[in-house]
Image (tube, helix red, strand yellow):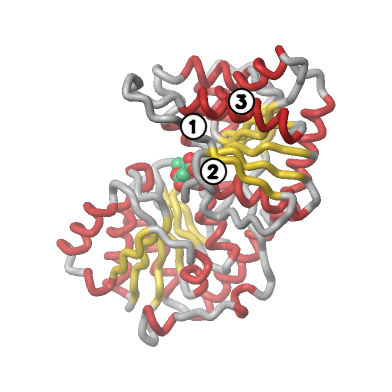
Amino acid sequence: MKIAIVCYPTFGGSGVVATELGLELARRGHEIHFITYRQPVRLALMNPNLHYHEVHVPEYPLFHYQPYELALSSKLVDMVKLHGIELLHVHYAIPHAYAGYMAKKMLKEQGIRIPMVTTLHGTDITLVGNHPFYKPAVSFSINHSDVVTSVSQSLKDDTYRLFDINREIYVIPNFIEVKEERKDGLPCKRNAIAGDGQRIVTHISNFREVKRIPDVVKIFNEIQKKIPARLMMVGDGPEREPAEKLVEELGISDKVVFFGNSNEINEILCFTDLFLLPSQTESFGLAALEAMALGVPVISTNAGGLPEVNREGISGYLGDVGDVEYMAEKAVYILSDDNRLDTFKRNALENAREFDIQNIMPMYENIYRRALKQQFV
Ligand code: GMT
């Protein structure tokens, strides 16, 4: 199949999922065209089936806001015609499904019919898309997609609850490549980060309010009172600076490292003993799955789709949003005994296998076949 993938090219989860999906589809022989404003961070164009087309938005002083959707839909039209693309797969309703719909309409006028698959990732539904300023456009784009998928059952339920949706939504969970040899094969530089007997706790995110960064710091503060430990804070965003201040106020600066954005996620997770994700909401929690796939247990909240990924008492524990005390207590429970920690590590890896890319990829291929077969407008 010849597929155009539209996504956000940044460190965010939806961009990572879209990129990894495109890479695997290309490995499986499909011709993949990424169409976005910057080359996605995880995209390595080392496969003849992979193509990247940049969307340029010319600056014009009259425009207060540069019209990205317009430029994107025009680019989609041009690329579909030039490369004979058969299907659009847009990640994130805003504004990608909207731009994709416009492209479909323009192509139809030129006698080209092309189906659009829309994948909902969460923030486009639960945080941004639900705002009254966007809601009608988001509902419209979802209802006019040919096939709609969501990354968890929880997100599917939220979409039906928050929007007036008249289409079937298919759940296709996020995925991960579980490599048997990865943990041993990597040069784990544990000693450069922590001394003997110190546990390593990690948090990775875009440091937005929804991640409840102060809770990460507070949970770690409780852990380090009982167990020698260090906290790795990976990522960047508006909550980073306040977190650095909080760490200083708590007098634990010597135990916390702020890495900023990193392309070495696997290297960091390789020496991690416990992952923290106390988010306000999380449609799936890809970062938690990435941790589990490297044998790292997870302490998270039970919000959104997290219970579909992290299993209570097996791969880690889940507390109510804001229940720092419970999450800290369970973190200490896991970290305070070598044998117990090893069991949780093994279970986390075992749990991650369910989401192995090889299990999930056929679901997307089936959805594409369905979209190509059905009568689309
Ligand atoms: O919150 C993030 O980390 C970024 C955000 C995004 O929009 O890319 O992630 C969302 O999509 C990911 C991939 O499907 C999910 O794993 C995240 O749970 C989801 N974030 C939220 O729901 C807050």
**Badge 2 or badge 3: first in the primary sequence:** 2
Mark pair 1, 3: CA separation:
15 Å
CA separation, marks 2 and 3?
Answer: 17 Å
Question: What residue is pinned by disc 1?
Answer: 124
Q: Is mark 3 within 8 Å of ligand 1?
A: no
Q: Is residue 369 left or right of residue 364?
A: right
Mark closer to the observer (1, 3):
3
The answer to whether the beta carbon of the residue marked 2 is less than 8 Å from any atom of ligand 1 is: yes
Report helix, strand or loop for mark 3.
Answer: helix
Q: Secondary structure at mark 1?
A: helix
**Amino acid type of disc 2?**
Ser
User: What residue is drawn where x is 57% and y is 34%?
Assistant: 120
Which residue appears at 49% of the width and 32% of the height?
124
Disc 1 to disc 2, C-alpha distance: 10 Å
Of all residues, the one furthest to the bottom in this rendering is 196
Question: Residue reaching furthest right?
Answer: 373
Q: Amino acid at mark 3?
A: Gly
What is the x, y in percent for residue 186?
57, 77
Q: On the image, which quarter does residue 350 sit in?
A: bottom right
Tell me whether circle 2 and circle 3 mark residues in contact (CB < 8 Å).
no
Q: Which mark is residue 316?
A: none
Most foreground residue, 130 or 63? 63
The reply to whether the residue tagged 1 has its Cβ within 8 angstroms of ligand 1 is yes
Which quarter of the figure has residue 204? bottom left
Find the residue positioned furthest to the top: 109
Does residue 253 appear to the left or right of 190 in the view shown? left
For residue 14, the mark is: 2
- Judged from the image, the secondary structure of the residue bearing numbered disc 2 is helix
